[in-house]
Image (tube, helix red, strand yellow):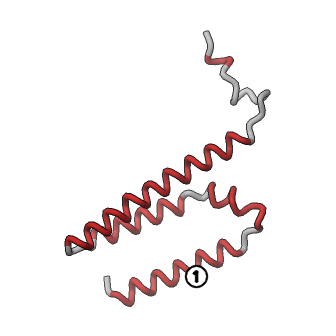
Amino acid sequence: MEGFVALYIFMLAAFTGYEVISKVPVILHTPLMSGSNFVHGIVVVGAMVALGFAETTAQQVIGFLAVFLGAGNAVGGYVVTDRMLEMFKTSDDPRSSNKGDQA
């Protein structure tokens, strides 16, 4: 991948991300961003593509770190979303009780 093509893709991604996030109301920002963990998956795919094009050892190490950190970011996003959704469960919600599990 040539340098100008990579720079062009980066600039398009940055502009699109800014435009999408700037249109979200402040009250919805955190739940929406936590719920949209697919963005983290796209980052991981991009890191894997970069790792696939790596030729030198330094590029391979940076690509591996990008995949590793991106995967950690994706997992962390799902953990945060799960914890946030747990806060909205009520005690009388049948899905949150363990009474059906007891024999």
Q: Residue 28 appears in which quarter of the rendering? A: bottom right
Q: Is residue 53 left or right of residue 27?
A: left
Q: Is the N terminus in the top left, top right, bottom left or bottom right quadrant?
A: bottom left
Query: Residue tagged by mark 1?
Result: 15
Q: Quadrant of the C terminus?
A: top right
Expressed as whole percent of the image width and height from the top left, the position of residue 22 reads 69, 75
Residue in view at x 77 percent, y 68 percent = 25
Give the residue drawn at x 49%, y 51%: 75
For residue 19, above or below residue 81: below
**In the image, what residue type sits under mark 1?**
Phe
Q: Position of residue 79 (x, y in %)?
A: 56, 47
Q: Is residue 18 above or below residue 40?
A: below
Q: Estimate the x, y position of residue 80 in percent, counting from the top left.
A: 60, 49
Give the farthest residue toward the bottom: 4
Residue drawn at (47%, 81%), measured in percent from left and top?
10
Q: Is residue 7 left or right of residue 84?
A: left
Residue furthest top in the image: 103
Q: Is residue 29 toward the left or the right of residue 9 in the image? A: right
Q: Which quadrant of the figure has residue 16? A: bottom right
